[in-house]
Amino acid sequence: MKQTMPAELGFSPARLARINTRMRWYVDNGLLAGMVTLVERRGRVVHFGRHGWQDIEAQKPVEPDTIFRIFSMTKPITCVALMMLYEQALFHLNDPVYKFLPEFKPVRVWADGGKRVAPARPITIHDLLTHTAGLSYGGYEGTGHPVDRLYDEADLFDPQILLGEMVRRIAGLPLIHSPGSAWVYSVATDVVGYLVEVLSDMPLAGYMQARIFDPLGMEDTAFRVHPDKADRFATLYGKTGRGDLEVLDTATGGDYFNVRLHAGGHGLVSTAADFLRFAQLIRNGGALDGTRLLGRKTVELMTLNHLPQALLPLRMEDPWPGFGYGLGFGVLVDLAQSGIMGSVGNVRWSGYANTHFWIDPQEDLIGLLLLQYLPGGTYPVTDDFKTLVYQALVD
């Protein structure tokens, strides 16, 4: 990947080199197998680091074209897919979801003692995009709500069902809260993906391929790993009862080679070069290299905070002070409260295996971190990377 001299883009070369030092520390101390780090500013890559191993046992190093499971970094791509249909006036954000997915019309809210009551209002498409629909993620997020157990029992993530079946199962479960009354990270983006299918009359994977990946030249981004690319697919590691860096999923097996469920909230694989193209599209207001997928005002709408103060701070496993949420992206609204360096208006999201990206419109900067380790947040590698990027910015 072609890189520009750091000083030309306002970075101290010596300070930027600290990224490599810290990432190698994670590898050398046996905490992480390997990772890719990328920093782009003003449309040019200023840092691209490859550290450690794609596969430890095979002694296969991370390469520029290593393919990673991006898990929930699928979500902003799915939201872009839906907003492309929004631009055709096929729906409005405040439309009730049941207008297009009638299985959601009889949905009920879990009340005290397990009683099911009518919600204060129907779920809207805006609720799905902002995770305020009242849906759950089951035990994955561990809210402690009784509905979480029902989600787990419904086997929503069976890789051999289709997205329509997944959404029908979701619609048959009670809501945690009435729509619009709380922010709960959830399977809402999976429902967004099914809305893309219904509104476009295309499978989600086919729509993304034809409308997003092909136009942007994202050649390695998909819901499955082609057998010809298996040697580029990184092994997934994590903490188990046997040790802290154990194999959880190999590059030659698992659901990524034989999967029917193409869900909107997770499931894509990608490379650093590919995901950078997507991030550049958002940073540029919906266009890249002469290809426009979204209008400038649509991207502006998506990257604003849509949550009222009463629903902040965001909370996943821990509180996220300083952040709001847009239409598919976390949005930095209070820099001091966040406790990290950046700029108000930054948009970001992460994946379960510690993948992460952010876009800083004020600094015209994109940061991208790709690695494969579960559970997410075990080590502060994301915050380390972000600190090391910003401390190197001198102009």
Image: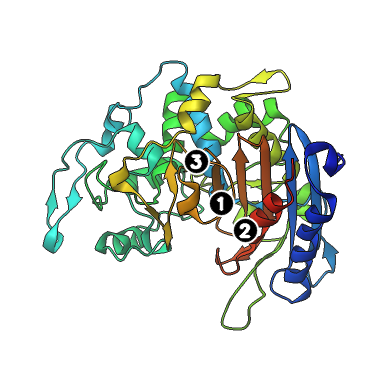
Of residues 380 and 144, the one drawn nearer to the viewer in this rendering: 380
Q: Position of residue 360 (x, y in %)?
A: 61, 39
Residue wearing tag 1: 350
Instruction: Kindly identify which numbered label has been placed on residue 382.
Output: 2
Q: How is the image coloured?
A: rainbow
Secondary structure of residue under mark 2: helix
Please identify the quadrant where the C terminus is shown.
top right
Q: How many marks?
A: 3
Q: CA distance from mark 1 to mark 2?
A: 9 Å
When the figure is inspected, residue 242 is found, relative to residue 128, above or below; the finding is below
Q: CA distance from mark 1 to mark 3?
A: 10 Å
Q: Nearer the viewer, mark 1 or mark 2?
A: 2
| Residue in the picture at 34% in, 49% down | 312
Q: Amino acid at mark 2?
A: Thr
When the figure is inspected, residue 185 is found, relative to residue 32, above or below; the finding is above
Which of pointers 1 and 3 lies earlier in the amino acid sequence?
A: 3
| Residue in the picture at 27% in, 41% down | 180
Q: Position of residue 67 (x, y in %)?
A: 73, 51
Question: CB of mark 1 within 8 Å of CB of mark 2?
Answer: yes
| Residue in the picture at 46% in, 46% down | 334
Residue wearing tag 3: 329
Whether residue 343 appears in this view of the structure is yes
| Residue in the picture at 35% in, 32% down | 125
Secondary structure of residue under mark 3: loop
Which of pointers 1 and 2 lies earlier in the amino acid sequence?
A: 1
Q: Is residue 146 left or right of residue 391?
A: left
Q: Is residue 58 left or right of residue 205?
A: right
